[in-house]
């Protein structure tokens, strides 16, 4: 009889670090890339959902999770909680919860496997948000989360 | 002090003060962030980039033809709502009078009947947009409390404006006070929520157009 075992967290196996450390690194990675242009983009989304109608992944599946602006939710969450104009209020009133390792895990699929960076979402956005650019920034944050510290640690697998 | 005096006096002053402070805080926080370095050589110089930015501000008012079949409902409802608001604000005689008091500018107003009709259409479009937000899976996923609160603070001035034109629900003074207070509530919320897109839309489109022009891409 086959036994099903829960695979270890890829975030944890990536560099022998506890998940909290990965999340902290991801946060730093997200925030390091946010300048006025990205902040403006993250601040001006009106949640109209038109970007979904331009995304091949959504058009083909009808799954709302593939809405392009939803794919960068961790980046927006990090910005609102740590860097945005009203970050203090978001933290004080718990309006935006801290990102968890589980959430980052879930978003790996949305950021890497569910976007081919075609840029159609950027072309349809009435607010002029370059969503493809934000996806690239969010990917970078995720990459930083798994990046090994120096000196390099011994590979775990 | 009557409710109307309160609305025209301290409430108005406080709302404008909050608006200015909120706008300053929000915009300063964005502008002061450190820009990302761009290492790729620009394809076009600054004049072309500024042209690209200006063009994008205009072209994004109408979606590309290829996208229309999937977003026609969203585009039409949004257009009716926004144009309706513009007609009410810039075509209604009391609003023009208010603008004249502050700026000295004035222009002919539209007949009251037209404004009431446009207000009704605007109200209907807002209800349709709300229902769509509740019913559409994508919009439901994306929506936050800000979306519903922003909808409410715009809906109330339109609603009280229609009631004011009829003067049937309450007396003129009470309805006028409620209309002014609801508009002040909208002004207070503007810098803190998605209503801020009224200004950010131009900055966002302009910046995107400039960035795309820098890369030599169509905007």
Image (tube, coloured by chain):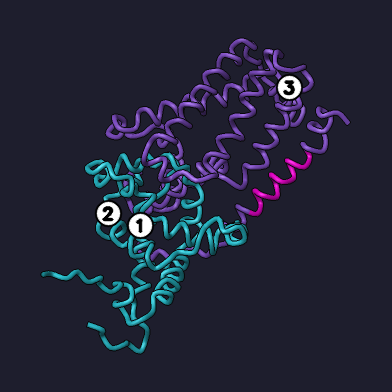
Chain colours: A cyan, B purple
CA gap between label 1 and label 2 equals 8 Å
Is residue A68 shown left or right of residue B190?
Answer: left
Magenta stretch, main secondary structure class: helix
- Taking the magenta stretch, the answer to whether it contains residue A153 is no
Observer-side mark, 1 or 3, equals 3
Kindly identify which chain the residue marked by label 2 belongs to.
Answer: A
Q: Tell me the crowding category of disc 2: few under 14, some 14 to 19, or many 20 or more residues within 10 angstroms, Cα based.
A: many
Q: Nearer the viewer, residue B148 or B37?
A: B148
- Crowding at dot 3, Cα within 10 Å, few <14 / some 14-19 / many 20+, comes out as many
Which of the labelled discs sits on residue B137, or is there none? none
Residue numbers of the magenta segment: B13-25
Q: Residue at x 75, y 45 (%)?
A: B17
Q: Work out whether A91 lies above or below B129.
A: below
Badge 3 sits on which subunit? Answer: B
* Labels 1 & 2 near each other (Cβ < 8 A): yes
- B77 and A104: which is toward the camera: A104
Q: Residues within 10 Å of mark 1 (few under 14, many from 20)?
A: many
Quarter of the C terminus of chain B within the rendering: top left
Q: Do the residues marked 1 and 3 share a common chain?
A: no
Q: Secondary structure at mark 2?
A: loop
Give x and y (percent) for residue A57: 25, 47
The numbered dot on residue B175 is: 3
- Which residue does the image show at 27% across and 34% down from the upper left? B66
Residue B36 drawn above or below residue B58: below
User: Tag on residue A135?
Assistant: 1
Residue B130 percent location from the top left of the image: 48, 32
Q: In the image, residue A123 lies at what x, y percent?
A: 34, 43
Looking at the figure, which quarter contains the N terminus of chain B? top right
Farthest residue, direction front: A1
- Give the farthest residue toward the left: A1
Reading the image, the residue beneath label 2 is A115
Question: For residue B218, what is the image quadrant?
Answer: top left
């Amino acid at each position: 009889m086959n036994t099903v075992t829960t695979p270890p967290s890829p975030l944890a196996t990536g560099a022998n670090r506890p998940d909290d450390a990965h999340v902290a690194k991801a946060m730093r990675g997200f925030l390091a890339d946010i300048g006025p242009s990205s902040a403006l983009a993250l601040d001006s989304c009106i949640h109209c959902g038109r970007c979904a109608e331009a995304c091949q992944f959504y058009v083909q599946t009808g799954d709302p999770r593939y809405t392009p602006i939803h794919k960068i939710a961790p980046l927006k969450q990090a910005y609102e909680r740590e860097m945005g104009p009203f970050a203090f209020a978001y933290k004080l009133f718990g309006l935006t919860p801290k990102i968890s390792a589980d959430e980052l895990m879930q978003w790996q699929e949305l950021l890497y496997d569910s976007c081919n960076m075609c840029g159609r979402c950027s072309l349809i956005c009435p607010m002029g948000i370059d969503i493809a650019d934000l996806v690239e920034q969010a990917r970078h944050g995720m990459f930083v989360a798994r990046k090994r510290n120096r000196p390099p640690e011994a590979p775990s697998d | 002090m009557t409710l109307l005096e309160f609305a025209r006096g301290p409430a108005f002053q406080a709302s404008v003060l909050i608006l200015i402070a909120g706008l300053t805080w929000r915009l300063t926080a964005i502008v002061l962030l450190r820009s990302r370095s761009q290492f790729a050589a620009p394809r076009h110089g600054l004049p072309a980039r500024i042209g690209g930015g200006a063009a994008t501000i205009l072209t994004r008012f109408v979606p590309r033809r290829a996208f229309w079949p999937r977003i026609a409902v969203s585009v039409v409802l949004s257009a009716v709502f926004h144009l309706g608001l513009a007609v009410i604000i810039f075509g209604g005689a009391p609003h023009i009078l208010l603008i004249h008091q502050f700026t000295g500018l004035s222009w002919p107003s539209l007949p009251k009947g037209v404004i009431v009709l446009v207000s009704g259409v605007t109200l209907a479009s807002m209800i349709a947009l709300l229902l769509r937000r509740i019913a559409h899976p994508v919009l439901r996923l994306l929506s936050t409390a800000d979306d519903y609160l922003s909808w409410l603070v715009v809906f109330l001035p339109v609603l009280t404006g229609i009631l004011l034109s009829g003067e049937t629900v309450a007396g003129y003074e009470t309805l006028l006070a409620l209309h002014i207070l609801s508009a002040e509530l909208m002004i207070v919320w503007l810098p803190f929520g998605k209503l801020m897109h009224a200004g950010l839309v131009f900055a966002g489109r302009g910046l995107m157009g400039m960035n795309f022009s820098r890369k030599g891409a169509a905007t």
